[in-house]
Amino acid sequence: MPQLNVHLTPEFQRSLAEYMRLRDLKTKSEAVRQAVLEALEVQISRRRTADFGSWLGLGNRAPQNPEPRFRRDDDLWTE
């Protein structure tokens, strides 16, 4: 199964904890999967097709790690 690593802001963590509580989810990974699935279902139901153009750039709006462990993606595999 592919892995996705995400840096969570304190605000997002609070929202995720509330989402987990409301849906009785036990793990953050299950909560994120469920939230993404719900977002996909909403997008598809609105347009009868998946259009994620509005999602472009969302990841870049999150705060960047001031001290990243790796400078480039390729460094993940070489160090």
Image: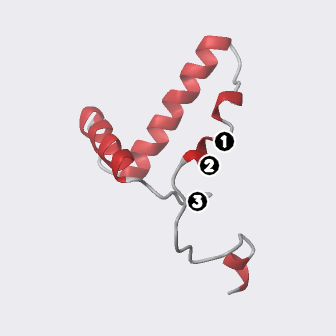
User: Where's residue 59, x and y in %?
Assistant: 60, 47
Q: Using the rendered image of the protein, determine whether residue 25 is visible from the camera's viewpoint.
A: no
Q: Residues within 10 Å of mark 3 (few under 14, many from 20)?
A: few
Q: Are marks 3 and 1 in contact (CB under 8 Å)?
A: no
Could you tell whether 64 is left or right of 25 in the image?
Answer: right
Instruction: Report the disc number at residue 60.
Output: 2
Q: How is the model colour-coded?
A: secondary structure
Q: Using the rendered image of the protein, determine whether residue 19 is visible from the camera's viewpoint.
A: yes
Could you tell whether 14 is left or right of 3 in the image?
Answer: left
User: Where's residue 21, x and y in %?
Assistant: 24, 39
Disc 3 versus disc 2: nearer the observer = 2
- The disc labelled 2 sits on which kind of residue? Asn
The N terminus lies in quadrant: bottom right
Residue at 52% of width from left, 65% of height from top? 65
Q: Mark 3 or mark 1, which has the lower sequence index? A: 3
Q: Residues within 10 Å of mark 2 (few under 14, many from 20)?
A: few
Q: Residue furthest bottom?
A: 79
Residue annotated with mark 1: 57
Secondary structure beneath label 1: loop
Cα distance, mark 2 to mark 1? 5 Å
Secondary structure beneath label 3: loop
Residue at 58% of width from left, 59% of height from top? 3
Residue annotated with mark 3: 3
Secondary structure beneath label 2: helix
Q: Mark 3 or mark 2, which has the lower sequence index? A: 3
User: Where's residue 12, x and y in %?
Assistant: 38, 46
